[in-house]
Image: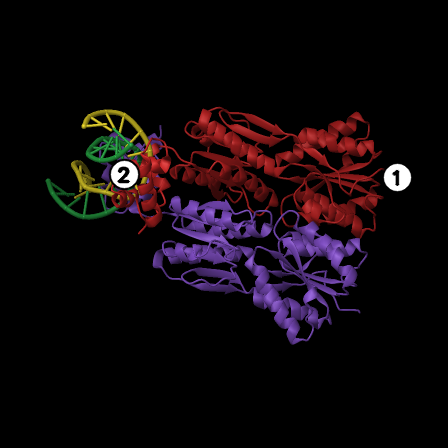
Chain colours: A red, B purple, C green, D yellow
Amino acid sequence: MKATIIDVAAKASVSVATVSRVVNGNYPVKEETRQRVMRAIEELRYVPNIQARELNMQKSTTIGVVVPSLYNMFFAEVINGIEDYLSRDSYSLLLSCAKNNPKQEAKCINDFISRNVSGIIVISPNTENIETNFYEQLVQHQSIVFINSYAKLPNISYVSNDEDMGSRIALQYLLDYGHKKILFLRGINSDSYQIKEDTYIEVMKKKGLYNPAYIVNVGEGNGTETVDNSMYKLMDMMLNLDATAIFTCNDLMAVGAVNACKKMGLQIPRDMSIIGYDNISLSHFIEPKLTTMDQNMFALGTNAAELLIEKIQTGKNKKVVLDNILIERDTTGPCLR
Amino acid sequence: MKATIIDVAAKASVSVATVSRVVNGNYPVKEETRQRVMRAIEELRYVPNIQARELNMQKSTTIGVVVPSLYNMFFAEVINGIEDYLSRDSYSLLLSCAKNNPKQEAKCINDFISRNVSGIIVISPNTENIETNFYEQLVQHQSIVFINSYAKLPNISYVSNDEDMGSRIALQYLLDYGHKKILFLRGINSDSYQIKEDTYIEVMKKKGLYNPAYIVNVGEGNGTETVDNSMYKLMDMMLNLDATAIFTCNDLMAVGAVNACKKMGLQIPRDMSIIGYDNISLSHFIEPKLTTMDQNMFALGTNAAELLIEKIQTGKNKKVVLDNILIERDTTGPCLR
DNA sequence: GTGAAAGCGCTAACAA
DNA sequence: TTGTTAGCGCTTTCAC
């Protein structure tokens, strides 16, 4: 079996208290004793049992992360950011997938609690359909951080992107290039599409360029079929419309738009400018590389981890809104028509 | 504070043993008493402390998963499979990222051990550069499953894709199309590149087509820069070589190869056939869609989880080898030169 | 500087 | 059926 602190104490002929002091270095120990203990630790290959330590200390260095799905690259990149920050602080990451199901989301969280996590990060939480008051009750005993939540509940820290501002930047960029007929591509089942559409309508109206026919809904926006659906949908539309630019709600749709143009023999960006949203790695894997609004998912992750640890340590909540910045690549250019 | 078993016992006027029996349902309890305890549990919102339970029972229901990187969707999809299987058995998943670094891989594993995991799954382990005997020592006290490992160490369970066979299929497919000059693209820091290279060399030698200059190492194979590195590396090489086909160790490299061809004005598949490996979602997002070998990452994950639990429970090791199947898309065709 | 001992929350003999 | 109690491995007062 694995060696315990008692084995080490026996081997070094000291008390367990002394071993603990050597291991944690928080109380003075005579150098000679320390050496003896260290040697015993080496020989027995002793590794402290963190479960026991945390049970005793009534605290934990594990945090839980719930994601709605792992099939979308977006989540992998956010998790990457969380993990990166956490590992620097020697926290561990317990991962659970809610499978796009609010009940499952609650179950994941309860499981985390019974495993004594010191805090929980929920990515794209589903606060609506969940049992009433679930989160309200939860926050009384748990440190919680929401990533990209549209619900505003008290006593929770939030990290999100400023998608309204990002959309303004994207549209202004196209307008500055002289584009007047700008298609807007959105999907269903996410508030973030609505945020962007509201901004699109406002901006275009203000310029006197608004045309409701330019709003295109491609259906499910995060599936494997999103790229193709966007492509086909656009190929239908563009026959009738004379747009010179397309603003899409995410990069998958943008890739679909790029493919549609290729299929229709349109040169990018000469004949058509396309700007995506997210900056998932895919966007610079394709050719031409996508101009897009960077959501910096890694930063979303690191910020969430930072806020959670702050919340755990100080009890203070905070809201962080990240700026989306424009990544100019090869799918946008001046309007030549 | 959170309610403990003692609080519940007090509230229900029973002993902690009775509460424990109710919670675990492993010993008979009078129905009336059970009701009373259940009510107390509800009212106090009691959630058992699994850390304490596991400390007592000397076992754990947490397993650790080490990945080399989260930037390649390959890993997210495998994790998805692991998580799916594990959650059915009420195991929890501790996730750690080794950042493509063997030392970090060992550190992640040691951390898991101190957190008392009942087993560890290592995806694409790096057994070469790691401290001598690290894994040999490890398996004496830990249940380990390797996913896609090249090294064969005793006392470990393995799940892998038959990358040797998959490579044969891919190469034979190209050979059948009449290709004779086939570039081989590989990376560093993963055993799976070596498996494929060995097969490549064997197959090509057998056909009398082997040319060591056709083996191209693009460096890190799972990073954000893998696509571009592959592209630049190939653009250098291809000036001197007259290959008609490229077999790459993963889809990221294949996308790099596609981009290199586009940059050099080569038509795919007319002037160059490219076959990837993995079948990550990216491979059908790009245009032309990638012909590739499907690794069925979800199955890789579920099988690994299954083997690990079997190993934990019975101590038995097993090897599972999954077949890779060819996904024909648009980047391969007959050799026209 | 060091040791003895209480206790973190829980389970499982053993008693009753 | 139920209660009492001894640990699981660790940290940390409180004595010495």
Return the x and y of residue B265 as percentages of the image width and height.
Answer: 81, 56
Q: Quadrant of the C terminus of chain A?
A: top right
- Other-residue count near label 1 (Cα within 10 Å), few / some / many at <14 / 14–19 / ≥20: few
Residue identified by numbered label 2? A16
Q: Amino acid at mark 1?
A: Leu
Name the residue furthest right: A337
B238 displayed left or right of B9: right
Query: Label 2 is found on which chain of the structure?
Result: A
A77 displayed left or right of B290: left
Assign a secondary structure to mark 1: loop
Label located before the other in sequence (1 or 2): 2
Residue at 39%, 44% (x, y): give it: B114
Name the residue furthest front: A32
Front residue of this view, candidates A215 and A68: A68
* Cα gap from disc 1 to disc 2, whole angstroms: 79 Å
Return the x and y of residue A271 as percentages of the image width and height.
Answer: 84, 44
Residue identified by numbered label 1? A336
Residue at 60%, 38% (x, y): give it: A298
Assign a secondary structure to mark 2: helix
Q: Amino acid at mark 2?
A: Val
Return the x and y of residue B49 as percentages of the image width and height.
Answer: 34, 38
Query: Label 1 is found on which chain of the structure?
Result: A
